[in-house]
Amino acid sequence: FSLHNSCSNKMCQVILTKPLRDCLLDIKGKFLVSYNDCPEIRELWDKPGIHIEEISRLNNLAQRYDGGCQYAELLISNYDTSERARSVRQLSLFDNETILEV
């Protein structure tokens, strides 16, 4: 679930995000929300059990004028997003096998 809005006013973004946050804090399942990185959003989501991960990604709208332009984004979740990466191993044809030379 990604929530990006066109409102450039920081307080407008917080006002629009607060009902979503309140709803998600009460769910029994997992959630993941991405949002532009700003102090107001960080403060709004600074709650027990909430994980905030900083990432950087390409700004697709700016690529035409500024190739490689990136912006800061937050991944906000109620679980450790790295837990899956630690538990899933990529399969290989050569795992636990001896490589035969021809």
Image (cartoon, rainbow, N blue to C red):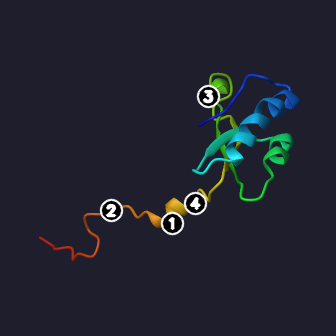
Of pointers 2 and 4, the one earlier in the residue sequence: 4
Callouts 1 and 4 close, C-beta under 8 Å: yes
- Give the residue at x 70% y 40%: 23
Label 2, residues with CA under 10 Å away: few <14, some 14-19, many ≥20: few
Indicate the quadrant where residue 92 lies.
bottom left
Callouts 4 and 3 close, C-beta under 8 Å: no
**To which residue does mark 1 refer?**
86
Q: Secondary structure at mark 3?
A: helix
**To which residue does mark 4 refer?**
82
- Which one is nearer the viewer's eye here, 27 or 79? 27
Of pointers 1 and 3, the one earlier in the residue sequence: 3
Of pointers 2 and 1, the one earlier in the residue sequence: 1
Q: CA distance from mark 3 to mark 2?
A: 32 Å
Image location of residue 50, percent across then percent down: 72, 55
**To which residue does mark 3 refer?**
60
Q: Which kind of residue does numbered mark 3 sit on?
A: Asn
Q: CA distance from mark 1 to mark 3?
A: 30 Å
